[in-house]
Image: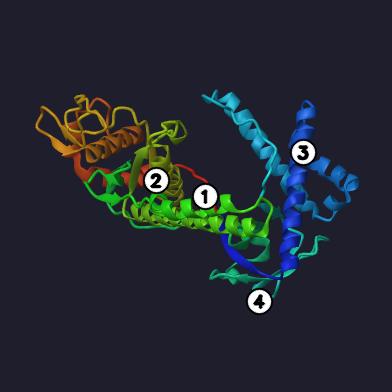
C-alpha cells in the first residue's frame, strides 16, 4: 500500500463544503462512540449499521456519502480496538480509552463518492455536500495505476490548504543486492544517530532553530481579539510555521532511514519507549524534536520494501556494557567516552551501537549468547553476509506497516 498526496485547487465555497464534510464525519464518529459507550457488546459491524440510522435521523449526515459514513465508524472502532488491545497486553500507564473528537481535520471515502477525470488531473466528489471538481496539484502520476487499485481517498485540511490522499493497493517490495554490511544504530541528542562503524549523523534540531519565530508568532496570536479575523490569520501563520517544522523533521527522517536501509543488510536499533522518556521535563522537548519514533517507523517500512532485516533490541545496558569484553562500566550521561579496563576506548554512542548490533545478531541466531564479545567481532562481516540469504528465506525479516503520512 502506498499513499500519493496532491494539493487541491478549488474555490472558496468548495473549501467550505470540505469543512462541512469533515464536521459531519466528526459528528458521526462521536455519535458512534457514544453509541458504543451506552450499549454493551457493540462491535464494529454494529457501528457500521448505526451510520445508516444516523442518516435517517439527521439530514445533514445523509448528504455525506455512505462509504464515508462507514469510514468514520471504522475510525471510531479502530480507537476502541486499540484500547482493548492495550488492556489485554497490560500496557503500563493509561490504556488510551477513546475520546470524543473536537478538531478533526480529515474525511475519508472508500470506493464511491468520488470520480477521477480521464486525464487523472482532476477529481470530482459526487455526494450531496456540493464539493464539486478540484484540480490535483502534485508531481505523482496516477496513470500507472488502475482505478480499482485505489482503496481510499482522503481529504485533509492543513494550515496551508486542502490536500487529497490516494491510498493505492500495490506491492512496494523491491529486490536489492546484498551489501555485506550490518550496522547497529544508537540514537541520541548530541548526534541524531551513531552507527557501529563510528559514523555520526548530526541532530538537525528543527524545532529549536524555529523557536524564536514560533514565540513571536504566538505572541501575535495572544494580542489579537478572540473571534476576530486578525486572530484567525495570526493562528494560520503560527500553524504554517509548525507545519514547516514537522515537514522538515519528516523529510530528514525519511531520507536518513532510506539511506541507512539501502546501504545495509541488517539494521539494528533500540526498542525505546519514547512515551516514557518524554516524562523527563528537562529533555522532553529535545526528545520530541529528534523524532526517534518516526525514524524507527521509516526504517521498518524501508526494510520491508527492500527486503532487508530490521531488528529492535532491548535498550538495557547498551551504553554501560563494554562491546569487547562485556564488562559493566558505569557512567553518567555527561561522560561521553567509554573506557574499559580491557583497553577499549570508544565514543559512548559508538560502543552502544556495537552492543545493539551484537544483541540483534543474537536474536537472529547468527551468534550464540555464550560466545565472547571478542569472538563475535572476530567473525567479521563475511560470516554474516553468507548467512543473510538464508535468514531472509526463513522469514526473519519483520512485517511492518507503512507509516502514516497524514
Q: In which quarter of the image is residue 326?
A: top left
Q: Which residue is drawn at 34% across and 47% down?
A: 389
Question: Tag 1: Cα neighbours inside 10 Å, few (<14), some, or many (≥20)?
Answer: some
Which tag, 3 or 2, sits closer to the chain's start? 3
For disc 2, the marked residue is 290
Measuring from the top left, give residue 307's x and y in whole percent: 42, 51
Give the CA distance from mark 1 to mark 4.
28 Å
Count of marks overlaid on the render: 4
Measuring from the top left, give residue 63's x and y in whole percent: 84, 56
Q: Residue furthest right?
A: 56
The numbered disc on residue 339 is none
Q: Are marks 1 and 2 in contact (CB under 8 Å)?
A: no
Give the CA distance from mark 3 to mark 2.
36 Å
For disc 4, the marked residue is 119
Give the CA distance from mark 1 to mark 2.
20 Å
Give the CA distance from mark 4 to mark 3.
38 Å
Of badges 4 and 2, the one in the foreground is 2
Which tag, 1 or 3, sits closer to the chain's start? 3
Secondary element under disc 2, as helix, strand or loop, is helix
Which tag, 4 or 2, sits closer to the chain's start? 4
For disc 3, the marked residue is 32
Question: Tag 2: Cα neighbours inside 10 Å, few (<14), some, or many (≥20)?
Answer: many
Q: Is residue 400 above or below residue 364?
A: below
The numbered disc on residue 402 is 1
Q: Quadrant of residue 130?
A: bottom right
Give the CA distance from mark 4 to mark 2.
41 Å
Q: Quadrant of the N terminus?
A: bottom right
Which tag, 1 or 2, sits closer to the chain's start? 2
Secondary element under disc 4, as helix, strand or loop, is loop
Question: Tag 4: Cα neighbours inside 10 Å, few (<14), some, or many (≥20)?
Answer: few
Amino acid at each position: 500500500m502506498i499513499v500519493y498526496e496532491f494539493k487541491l485547487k478549488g474555490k472558496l465555497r468548495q473549501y467550505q463544503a470540505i469543512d462541512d464534510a469533515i464536521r459531519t464525519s466528526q459528528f458521526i464518529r462521536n455519535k458512534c462512540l457514544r453509541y458504543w459507550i451506552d450499549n454493551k457488546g457493540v462491535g464494529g459491524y454494529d457501528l457500521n449499521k448505526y451510520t445508516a440510522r444516523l442518516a435517517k435521523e439527521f439530514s445533514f449526515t445523509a448528504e455525506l456519502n455512505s462509504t464515508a459514513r462507514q469510514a468514520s465508524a471504522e475510525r471510531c472502532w479502530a480507537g476502541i480496538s486499540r484500547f482493548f488491545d492495550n488492556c489485554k497486553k497490560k500496557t503500563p500507564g493509561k490504556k488510551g480509552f477513546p475520546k470524543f473528537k473536537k478538531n478533526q481535520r480529515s474525511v475519508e471515502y472508500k470506493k464511491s463518492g468520488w470520480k477521477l477525470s480521464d486525464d487523472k488531473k482532476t477529481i470530482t466528489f459526487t455526494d450531496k455536500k456540493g464539493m464539486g471538481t478540484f484540480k490535483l496539484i502534485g508531481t505523482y502520476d496516477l496513470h500507472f495505476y488502475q482505478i480499482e487499485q485505489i482503496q481510499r481517498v482522503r481529504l485533509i485540511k492543513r494550515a496551508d490548504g486542502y490536500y487529497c490522499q490516494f491510498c493505492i493497493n500495490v506491492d512496494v517490495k523491491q529486490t536489492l543486492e546484498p551489501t555485506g554490511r550490518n550496522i547497529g544504530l544508537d540514537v541520541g541528542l548530541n548526534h541524531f544517530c551513531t552507527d557501529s562503524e563510528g559514523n555520526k549523523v548530526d541532530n538537525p534540531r528543527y524545532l529549536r532553530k524555529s523557536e524564536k519565530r514560533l514565540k513571536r508568532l504566538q505572541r501575535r496570536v495572544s494580542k489579537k481579539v478572540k473571534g476576530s479575523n486578525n486572530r484567525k490569520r495570526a493562528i494560520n501563520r503560527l500553524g504554517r510555521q509548525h507545519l514547516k517544522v514537522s515537514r522538515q523533521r519528516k523529510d530528514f527522517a525519511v531520507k536518513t532511514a532510506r539511506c541507512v536501509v539501502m546501504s545495509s543488510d541488517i539494521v539494528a536499533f533500540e526498542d525505546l519507549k519514547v512515551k516514557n522518556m518524554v516524562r523527563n521535563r528537562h529533555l522532553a522537548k529535545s526528545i520530541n524534536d529528534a523524532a526517534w519514533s518516526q525514524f524507527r517507523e521509516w526504517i521498518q517500512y524501508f526494510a520491508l520494501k527492500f527486503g532487508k532485516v530490521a531488528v529492535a533490541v532491548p535498550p538495557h545496558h547498551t551504553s554501560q556494557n563494554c562491546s569487547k569484553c562485556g564488562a559493566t562500566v558505569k557512567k553518567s550521561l555527561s561522560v561521553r567516552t567509554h573506557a574499559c579496563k580491557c583497553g577499549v576506548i570508544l565514543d559512548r554512542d559508538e560502543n552502544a551501537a556495537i552492543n545493539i548490533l551484537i544483541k540483534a545478531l543474537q536474536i537472529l541466531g547468527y551468534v550464540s549468547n555464550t560466545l565472547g564479545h571478542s569472538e563475535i567481532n572476530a567473525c567479521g562481516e563475511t560470516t554474516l553476509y553468507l548467512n543473510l540469504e538464508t535468514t531472509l528465506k526463513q522469514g526473519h525479516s519483520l512485517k511492518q506497516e507503512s507509516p502514516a503520512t497524514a
